[in-house]
Image: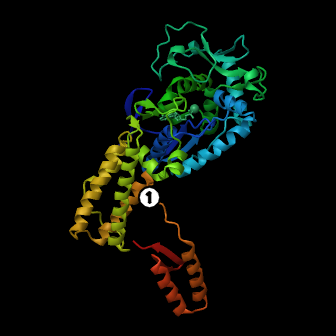
Amino acid sequence: MALRFFNTLTRQIEDFAPLEAGRVRMYTCGPTVYNFAHIGNFRAYVFEDLLQRHLEFRGLRVERVMNLTDVDDKTIRGCRAAGIPLAEFTLPFKKAFFEDLDSLRIKRADHFPEATAADHIARMISMISTLMEKGHAYRADDGSVYFRIHSFPSYGRLAHIVLDELKPGARVSSDEYEKENVGDFALWKAHDEGDGDVWWESPWGRGRPGWHIECSAMATGILGPQLDIHCGGEDNIFPHHEAEIAQTESVTGLPFAKLWMHCKHLQVEGTKMAKSAGNFFTLRDLVEDKGWSGREVRYALISVKYREPLNFTFEGLGGARSALLRIDQWTARLIETAAGSPAGDLPEITALEGFGTALDDDLNISAGLAAVFDVIRETNRRLDAGNLASAEAAALLLWLAGVQSVLHLEPEPEAVPGVVTELLARRVAARNAKDWKASDALRDEIASLGWTVKDTKEGQKLIRKN
Ligand code: AMP
Ligand code: ZN
């Protein structure tokens, strides 16, 4: 089956075909680094990770950009309140963001551009100049430069807004606003007192970019004028992505992104998890304070389809823990049964096909996981009956490796205790001295601590005994 995804732009499920065969250009709006990202934000990033990994599973090469918004209304407000320079204020949140990505096993994007980098600021200024030249932008009496939304006839198409009733000349200068306040939006904000020492020189005097032009400049600067996929959370649809389309297409004259994908918000008791609502958990809250693992949080976030609402609960995390245990125990059983045998044919289980085809169908992860658990149930039945050959178990392990390349939910490799490492080093020395008796004794001692040593061409290998 072909890959099919829901496109926010057309409100339809469409067959996916990249602009260039075999290659996908993907842009995902990244964090605004004014605070620690909450796990609602991470629902968006985990969904994008699943998307990228599934495209790669299907043989596509993905080039992905995730930006860091390190200058906007919120970051400026934050650094002013803290009384420190902007870059100093955002740095710890950038660092924390990367740690959290690793903890949730999110694949690093190929590029993480920062809005404040000189080359990106230069590109923003150059795009705004082009918009001025083409009559899409104007300088208002407050000194800022605005995008004239009536100059772009399809403005509102992504968010399904009809512009007819809008009074010409209505303007919004803040980075975030509601549909009710739709109006010309700021591309370049003239410096004012509230901005402190955050400003860049431009043809329109000192100022700073609006949030929307940042993403247009970084996306096209790195990936070129046209993208295959642009993603974000559903709150990005308006005004952010609507504005990105208007600005970019007015500069390039080409359709910007072919496919727009947005995940539904993570909710807490029926309302959006958001910093402003005060109902949020950071990953740190869950991992450091409450003892959940990044893998468990990943499972909880990934296991509900991106277009379905996901309600955050601790019961949900408990469910993630049990589901992972079931996968882990099954994997261990397969390893034991395969006992190093080469892979033969897969056993005939219909659900084996189900995982990939479910994800092909607009990332239907719920159906994909159901297929995985069907395979587990069926093989466990065969294992109980002593009816699964070692070559079949080995083939199932290969199948599982494919599934895990998408889900990335493998158990953490267990840390080797210091005492075992020490015995291992002594065994190397004994073997170098050809003292086989000592080497065997050390192997037994290591075994008594629960680890098996295998001598391979590359040296000693440690395996945790089940
Ligand atoms: P921000 O740091 O606010 O710019 O948000 C970063 C990303 O997280 C954007 O793609 C947002 O759409 C997304 N996001 C924010 N809140 C939530 C939520 N509760 N659930 C899912 N995604 C969210
Ligand atoms: Zn963006």
**Number of numbered discs visible in the structure rendering:** 1
Q: Residues within 10 Å of mark 1 (few under 14, many from 20)?
A: some
Task: Name the residue rendered at 48%, 52% in the picture.
Answer: 291
- Which of the 4 quarters of the picture holds residue 244? top right
Quadrant of the image for the N terminus? Answer: top left
Q: Quadrant of residue 421?
A: bottom right
Q: Is residue 301 visible?
A: yes
Q: Please identify the residue farthest to the front as the structure is shown.
A: 289
For image coordinates 57% across by 15% down, the residue present is 149
* Residue 225, percent from left and from top: 59, 32
Nearer to me, 391 or 377: 377
SS state under label 1: loop
In the visual, does 389 lie left or right of 73?
A: left
Q: Which residue is mark 1?
A: 410
Is the residue at mark 1 in contact range of ligand 1, meaning its CB lies under 8 Å from it?
no
Q: Position of residue 402 (x, y in %)?
A: 40, 57
Question: Which residue type does callout 1 highlight?
Answer: Glu
Q: In terms of depth relative to the viewer, which is nearer, 354 or 60?
A: 354
Residue 270 is situated, as x and y percent measured from the top left of the image, at 40, 30
Closer to the camera in the image, 393 or 17: 393
> In the rendered image, is residue 106 in sight?
no
Residue at 47% x, 13% y is 162
